[in-house]
Image: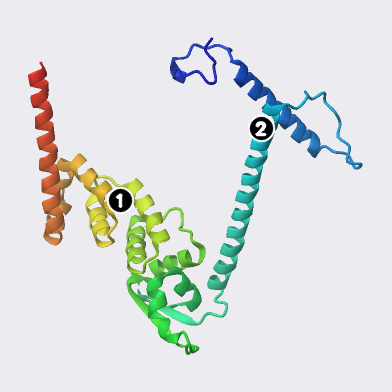
Amino acid sequence: MDCCICSPMATKYRLPRNAICAPCYEGAKAIITFLNNDEQEEEEDGHGSVRSRGLMKPNSTTKGMRDAWEGVKEMRDREEETTHRAAYLQQGLALAWEEGIHTDILVEPGTGAPIPAHKAILAVRSEVFRHMLSSDEHCKAPAGDSISLPELAHEELSLFLAFLYTGALGQDLPERQLHALLVAGDKYDVPFLRRACEARLTARVGPRNVLRTLEVAELSSSAALRERAMGAVVEHAEQVVFSPEYDDFAVRNAGLCVEITRALLAKMSMRTEAQCEELIGS
């Protein structure tokens, strides 16, 4: 008899039936028993008594399922505690930055007004910042102390600092800002920011933006994004190579154009070999 739960046959090929083997039946019964017991414990009255519902006598299967369920509950409690702790820390750091509480350094963008920040936060989030600020390790920096990040505009710098304090990116950031943040994450050695930007940019790669994405991937040494962008170029070669943007791209990125040409030739070679094999086989 094929079990509708543990049968080795693929699910989509199984016939619709209610057949169940003995081990699966005992396991399901044990889970139901434990859940009923768990509900009863939550419904204890003021004297600590539990209303009986005629539960079956515990056995080794029930005990195993109970232990497993307790493990799941423990992991769930730990996850909730971790989430609350992260939210607590994030809210505190975000408030310190947003309200400028006891800031001790100004971060100057390429354009726009400088933004107050905390040396300690910059130093713990980035090894590069730690080295940049190491000269003030043994003495208090003057109130007007500042560092400059000229490659970032004011809005981009604000997003960058917000991420250092909270570890979060806005939901609908435009590609231009994600590009700037990815490059900044690479330059100032913030791996978590790099991964966050890579994930979003990789999901957005298409024929219209692939050349700019490829340039940014090269600039930020992002292997994953570079591979995805190169694959999109090969996949949409005609649309990309004959686009108006490709001429300027080729002037700026001769090395990448060589790689694109080689990738296209490799794809053509593979296609030719496949066609020859089909002809030989027929």
Q: Is residue 140 left or right of residue 77?
A: left
Query: What residue lies at 59% left-to-right and 15% top-to-bottom?
Result: 20
Query: What residue lies at 40% left-to-right and 64% top-to-bottom?
Result: 190
Label 2: which secondary element? helix
Foreground residue among 8 and 103: 8
Per the image, the residue denoted by label 2 is 64
- Could you tell me residue 68's position as x and y percent? 64, 36
- Could you tell me residue 57's position as x and y percent? 78, 24
Foreground residue among 259 and 233: 259
Query: What residue lies at 34% left-to-right and 55% top-to-bottom?
Result: 175
Per the image, the residue denoted by label 1 is 224
Check the image and tell me how it is coloured. Answer: rainbow
Residue 5 sits in quarter: top right
Query: What residue lies at 44% left-to-right and 15% top-to-bottom?
Result: 13
Which residue type carries mark 2?
Gly
Which residue type carries mark 1?
Ala
Q: Quadrant of the C terminus?
A: top left
Circle 1: is it few (<14), some (14-19), or many (20+) Cα within 10 Å?
A: few
